[in-house]
Image: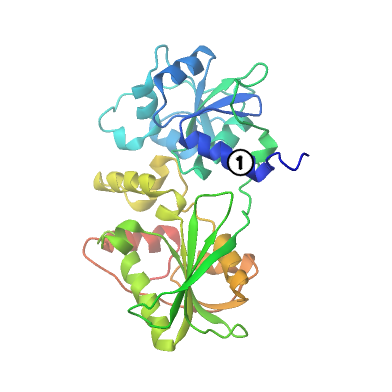
Amino acid sequence: MDALSPTLPERLARARADLRLGLPVALGGALVLPAEGPDPARLSAMAARGAALAVTARRADTLRARAYDGDLARLVPPPGADAPWVAAVADPTLDLATPLKGPFRSLRGDGPPSAAQARAALRLLKAARLLPAALLAPLDGPPPPGVAALALADVAEAPLLPLAEVVSARVPLQAAAGASVRAFRSPLDDAEHVAVEIGAPDRARPVLARLHSACLTGDVLGSLKCDCGPQLRAALARMGEEGAGVLLYLDQEGRGIGLANKLRAYALQDQGFDTVDANHRLGFEDDERDFRVGAQMLRALGFSAVRLLTNNPAKVARMEEAGVRVAERVPLRVGLTPQNAAYLATKVARSGHLP
């Protein structure tokens, strides 16, 4: 391969960026267009090619559509299906406004588009933090000029992106005057992860650590719907008291679904759904985060073992799987409010958190 040509991870990054712009991507013999806010002209062009609408089985269950492919459904749009129809099928926050969308006819068998093409498209949309709903049309011949192209094997599973420290700066905090903040970034992603190092932790001993996923509403705005802000401040305070620790602030808002989709989940919670059911209605799993990122950062900082501040056993398991030994799980029970009591109970009952 020419050294000036993009690598596979770079082509994946380009495809994610194009999808976020509303541009189509060629994927294993199919054209893929996000169902979230499609341009009417592009939607018409896709319809002329015989596009189907792929949604996850989670979303299909809400729509009462048959998911013949197990983890997804390929829906046949009715004649004259327009952008509002596509948006209403893709976005559950519109369900009350457009309650009558079916009945739906689901494809089964080889397609087109195939289940494998739809599965890869949905995986790519999740990585782009868009709603997991895609228009797919058969592609006979080369893709249109300028359209990025990928093979199905290119999107087989989420790759572990290369991550490197970009810069470190001293930032005195309320919890600890002796703190430094280190920014980590991958050249193949727009996420920026942060490691807050308190004091000078001994690399030869398990470090008091917390994996904290970004939460704009809780950490910054003081939302009472979750316990994220109190957990963030309590973790830093505990590290300040001990004189050493590291907090990994991961750019994985909304359990990895992105800020806009998290707010969609909040809108569904206002309709009476709990946090797990809201994610499912959006087409996502309970938790879409990738904690391998945290393990990468810890290793880059020279840590191989942690005392992990968490109530979530899944974080312990993911760290161990990624090669970081968890010497101790340190409970972190703070932030209960009347507004988040049901949310915290749901995390215990349905997401496996410890009370």
Name the quarter where the N terminus is drawn. top right
Read off the residue under disc 1: 12
Residue occupying the point 49% across, 61% down: 193
Q: Nearer the viewer, residue 116 or 210?
A: 210
Work out whether residue 226 or residue 62 is closer to the camera in this orientation and state it. 226
In screen coordinates, is 332 left or right of 225? Answer: right
Observer-nearest of 311 and 211: 211
In the displayed structure, 116 sits above or below 342; it is above
Q: Position of residue 327 (x, y in %)?
A: 57, 80
Up-down relation of residue 241 to residue 43 (above or below) = below
145 left or right of 183?
Answer: right
Number of numbered labels in the structure image: 1
The residue located at (52%, 19%) in the rendering is 51
- Which quadrant would residue 71 be assigned to in this image? top right
The C terminus: image quadrant = bottom left
124 lies left or right of 271: right
Q: Residue furthest right?
A: 1
